[in-house]
Amino acid sequence: MKKRILIVIIPVLTLFSLISVAQTELKDCDSVVFSVAEVGPKLQVSFEKMEHLLNKKLDLENIEISNDDEVTIQVLINCNGIDERYTVLRGKDRLLTNRIIEILKEESKWTPAYQLDQPVNYLFQWKFRIDDSSLHFLNKNDN
């Protein structure tokens, strides 16, 4: 009987220890937000892959859009590299910009920005142009 109890207790204790380690890794972010930092946040995939993914998931050929439409979406990358608070700064089609935000939330993973060797909150702007039924990043070199 004692063997059965130990078998149940050990996995439960292991699970609780993993949860507590995961929770302690997240830092409390300061309320200061940077728009320029010594090291900006880094997207963990290339802009080219993200552009391809957005074009594939958006299926722009079946959406009526005006050519040369520019879209700017601002996002806060917190000191833990988590993207939050997406805001549309420029974009005519609300349904399209909302869909772009959904995809960005699902697919983008970040490392945080750093200032004085400390991770910081950072405002990042996604900028792209839509023409010929495809989306093109305008700020590929920002990463």
Image: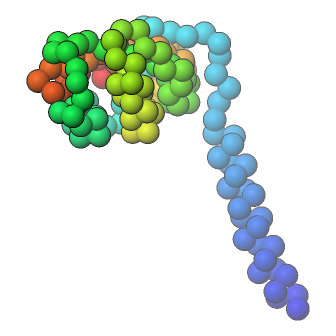
Query: Where is the N terminus found, in terms of image quarters?
Result: bottom right
- Choose between 29 and 68: the one closer to the eye: 68
**Furthest residue toward bottom:** 1
Residue at 69% x, 42% y: name it. 23
Residue drawn at point x = 22 percent, y = 24 percent = 64
Is residue 101 visible from the viewing direction of this image? yes
* 29 displayed left or right of 108: right
Q: Position of residue 75 (x, y in %)?
A: 46, 19
Residue 13, horizontal then vertical, whole percent = 77, 64
| Residue 122 relative to residue 60: left or right | right
Give the residue at x 17% y 12%: 68
- Quadrant in which the C terminus is drawn: top left
Q: Does the image show residue 49?
A: no
Give the image location of residue 104, x and y in percent. 39, 32
Could you say which quadrant of the image residue 46 lies in?
top left
The one nearer the camera, 77 or 88, is 88
Position of 31 compared to 118: left or right? right
Residue 138 sits in quarter = top left
State whether residue 109 is above or below residue 117.
Answer: below
Residue at image position (39%, 39%) is 107
Which color scheme did the rendering employ for the protein? rainbow
